[in-house]
Image (cartoon, helix red, strand yellow):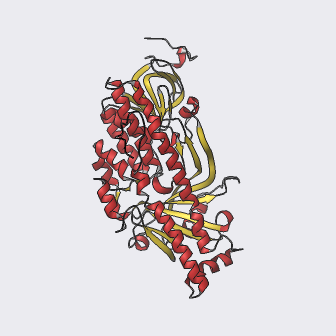
Amino acid sequence: MAVFDDGIKDTALPTHGIVETDVLVVGSGPSGASAALALATYGVPNIMITKYRWTANTPRAHITNQRAMEFFRDMAVVDDVKSLLTPHHLIGDTVFCSSIAGEEFGRILTWGTSPARHADYEAASPELNGDIPQNHLEPILVRHAAARGTQARFSTEYVSHVQDAEGVTTTVLDRVTGQQYRIRSRYLIGGDGARSKVAADLGLPFEGRMDIAGSMNITFRADLTALVGHRPSVLYWVVKPGANVGGIGAGLVRMVRPWNEWLIVWGYDIAQPAPDVDAAAAKEIVYDLLGTRDLDVEVTGTSLWGNNEMYATTLHRGRVFAVGDAVHRHPPSNGLGSNTSIQDSYNLAWKLAAVLRGYAGEALLDTYTAERAPVARQIVARANQSSREFGGFFEALGVTTAEDEAAMVAAIEERKVNTPAGAAKRAALAKAMDLKNYEFNAHGVELGQRYRSNAVIGDGTP
C-alpha cells in the first residue's frame, strides 16, 4: 500500500489503517444520499459519511418534482417514496390570506394541478410530482443505498482531503471516539450543504453572496383539518400588518403532513441580531398566523437560516466533485433545491460508474461541470427572482406605502370597495398573483434543461 505523507500521525488512525473505496461521498442529504444510492445501484463500491448521527431531523425541502420522481423510479425506490408522498392532487391551491382562519385574498392552482396545466404534467412524464418532507425522504434513500452496498458512516466528519494522479486521500473524524483516520478513494463527492467544506477546500469559484435575508422555521403539530381540508394545499401565505420586518408580516404556513404537522417560515432582518424565540414566543407566532387560539398547538422546534444567492461556476477539480447545495445556494422559492441536488448526483453517478468500469475515458467527467453549472446558475437566478416578486403582491395590497398598521389594514380593505381605486387595486392584485402563478407552475424550469457538452452530439438543429 502506498504511503501518503499528509501530516497526520499514525496515532490518529484506527488499527486497520487507511480505508479504501472507489468513491467517498460526504453528506447524507438529498444530493449525498442520491449519489450513494445511484453508485450502489450501479455496483460501484462507495462510502457515505455524515457528521450527524442520523438523517435530517426537520422537514426542510419538500416539493418533489417529476424529474426527481423519475430518478426514484429508475432507482426502483419510487414505491417507497410514494408511500410517504402527499400526492399531486392534494398539493393544489396556494392560498394568500390574512390568516389560516381568516380572510382569503386569493388562491392559485399550483404545481400543475390546474385544469389548464394538468395535461402538461401528465404528458411530460410517467411520474407526477408530490410533496415529501426531507426528513421522510432521506431515510428511504440511505436505507436502499446501504442495502445495495454503500458503507454508511454516521457521526463521521470530513476534515480535509489531498488528491493526486491516482486518487484522493480524505481525513475524517470519528465524532464518537474522537479519532481521525483516512479514507483512500478514486473519487470524492462533496454533498455537504450550503456551507460545504469540500467546496471551500477545493477552491471552487463562486458568484453571488450568502445570507442576503434571514428566516426562522417553527415546526408545530395541530389538527387544522377543519380549516384547510376543503382547500388542500402545501402553502398558505399569510399577510399580517404590523408584524415582522418593516411592519409588513409575510409568514408562510407550510403543510408537512396532512393536516396535523406544519412548518412556519417567518422572516427577520439579518442585519440585526438574530431573534431569540423560545417555545412560548414561537407559539404566539403560530397562533397569530393561524388566526385562532381555538386549537391545541404543540411547538416541536425552531431554527434560523439564511437566504442565499450564490452558485459555483466550476463544479469540480480533478477527482473531487461538489453536488447539491454545495454549488447552488438559494431560497426555497419554486421548490428547486433538493430536486436539482438529486439531478446533480444522478448526472455524476452514471459517469463515474462508466469511467470506473472502463466504458468511458475520464474526459467524460469534465461534462459534469459543462452540463450542470448552467443549471446551477439558472435555478439560483429563478429562485431569487421568485422571492423578490413577492414585492409586487405587497405593493398591490398597498401595504408598502402605508404609514402604520391601521393604514395597512385600510389599504387591504380598499380592494373590496366599488370605486375606481378599489377596481384598480383588484386589477393590480390579479396581475401580481398571475406573476406568482408563473413561479408555482414553472414546468420549464423543472424539466426544460438542455445540456451542451462534449458528451452530447447534436444534429445541427436547435
Q: Is residue 25 visible?
A: yes
Question: Looking at the picture, does residue 326 appear above or below residue 243?
Answer: above
Residue 411 image position (x, y, % from top left): 63, 78
Residue at far front of view: 460
Residue at the (45%, 61%) spot, across then down: 440
- Give the side of residue 85 with respect to residue 157, left or right: left
Left or right: 405 in relation to 153: right
Considering only vertical position in the picture, is 356 above or below 460?
A: above
Q: Residue at x 60, y 77 (%)?
A: 412
Judge by depth and name the residue closer to the eye, 170 or 347.
347
The percent coordinates of residue 6 (x first, y second) are: 56, 17
Is 2 drawn above or below residue 300 in the view shown? above
Position of 166 with respect to 122 (left or right) is right
Residue 28 visible somewhere in the drawing: no
* Residue occupying the point 60% across, 65% down: 391
What is the x, y in percent for residue 387?
A: 56, 58
